[in-house]
Amino acid sequence: MSEIYRRIGLLAAPNPLAFVGNLSSFASASPDTTLVLASISIPNRALTFTREGDRYRAPYEVKLTLTRDGIEAASVNAMEIVRVGSFRETNRTDESVIFQHYFHVLPGVYTLSAAVRDVGGSRTASEEARVVVPSLSAGRLSTPTLVYEATGRSALDSAPRLLASPRSSAVFGRDSTVAIYIEGYGQGPRLPVNFIVRNDKGAQIWRDSATLGRNGALFGGVVNVPISSVGVGIARVFFTRRDAGVPDTVGAPLFVSFGEDIPLMSFEDMLGYLRFFATPSRLNALRNAPLEKRATMWAEFLRATDPVPETPVNEEMQAYFGRIQQANIQFRMDRNPGWLSDRGMVFVTLGEPDQVLEQNVNRTFSPTQVANAVRLQIWQYRQYNSQLVFYEDTGRWKLTRQSETEFLSLSSRRQH
């Protein structure tokens, strides 16, 4: 995931202390100074929590520095504490902790350095990126900023009151829209803007227009982009002024996924991956859904298969994709990819066997059942009162016919 965030222009550190950072620029009261919002997203799972009465707490430290030509222009070093009400919340992988800070700096090219430390543990992470801080005056637009909430401002000597989404992301089926806060500068009662969403290949996938109302000394507002129209994948949102003069165009990344722990893929690819998770009838209903209804039907599918609906992730699906990842490593010699091998599909569908036994072929199995195999592998599943037998054939492990029939029966019972 960190590679995807870097690809769309964000600051990103990988596990075990994963964080994502972003920078947004706004006009200030001084024409020679730009107001910069630096925001950092940290998942709860990256921090070490300890018990505090009936709650859990995790202290963390964030240091942000902007340097120009090797000289420090602005910095902040902050100690923060996040508190949650249950142990389950400590393992959240989504954008659960957000740190943000405003700087006043001169326009120009900077190096942004971000360091995050898990105070309760031994984990640290740091990243650097080259950033350009624009000069924002009349006729310009601010950086479009994905937000969870925003009330804007009416004067340039104050800061916008907003909670940013540093990952610039949304989850397909969970989020119906993404909110983007944007400001414009200049004269007039209102500011018309066009906005276009393009995918990672540059193709236009959605467009609309809006009017930003004047609020004191500036124009400002929140534009909502429908996720059902954008679909899954990497995109970019572009805003262009439609008032007189030279038009100003600004852009921001938008990343729509199926969830933080699920690989980025198309809708069709996702349904292919879910062949051992859901029944054919459920998958066919999703596959045949009109484009404009896919997000709604996917949300209904997630609710129907989520064992703990009050949490932000589908734990069952999260575990399923975790098994796919393990199967691709453990059974890569059986078939590429490993999760589609016989042992892989059993592992992904039924999970880790309670016991694995190996033995040489005996007269219990006829040559037609095990071909020319000389070794057997027996996987025992106590909860199903079942054992599945694999035989080795030219370096690959395959289910016996009887075990294949039994597995198909167990799979139909396990599917959602």
Image (spheres, rainbow, N blue to C red):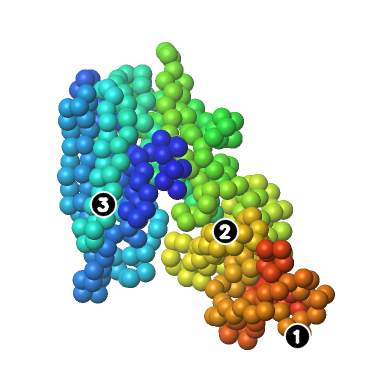
Q: Is residue 71 left or right of residue 146?
A: left
- The mark closer to the camera, 3 or 2, is 2
Q: Is residue 308 visible?
A: yes
Q: Are circles 1 and 3 on residues that touch, CB within 8 Å?
A: no
Amino acid type of disc 1? Thr
Q: Secondary structure at mark 3?
A: strand
Callout 2 environment at 10 Å: few (<14), some (14 to 19), or many (20+)?
some
Label of residue 364 in the image? 1
| Residue drawn 20% across the image and 54% down it | 80
Identify which residue, 364 or 76, lies in the foreground.
364
Provide the residue designation for mark 3: 124
Callout 3 environment at 10 Å: few (<14), some (14 to 19), or many (20+)?
some
Counting from the top left corner in percent of width and height, residue 11 is at 35, 40
Amino acid type of disc 2? Asn
Callout 1 environment at 10 Å: few (<14), some (14 to 19), or many (20+)?
few
Q: Secondary structure at mark 2?
A: helix
Q: Is residue 246 left or right of residue 285?
A: left
- Occupied quadrant, residue 349: bottom right
**Quadrant in the picture for the C terminus:** bottom right
Identify the mark nearer the N-term, 3 or 2. 3
Q: Secondary structure at mark 1?
A: loop
Counting from the top left corner in percent of width and height, residue 23 is at 32, 36
Counting from the top left corner in percent of width and height, residue 61 is at 20, 51
Q: Look at the picture and state if 144 lies above or below 315.
A: above
Distance CA(mark 1)–CA(mark 3) = 57 Å
Provide the residue designation for mark 2: 328
What residue occupies the far right of the structure in this picture? 368
- The mark closer to the camera, 1 or 3, is 1
Counting from the top left corner in percent of width and height, residue 181 is at 38, 37
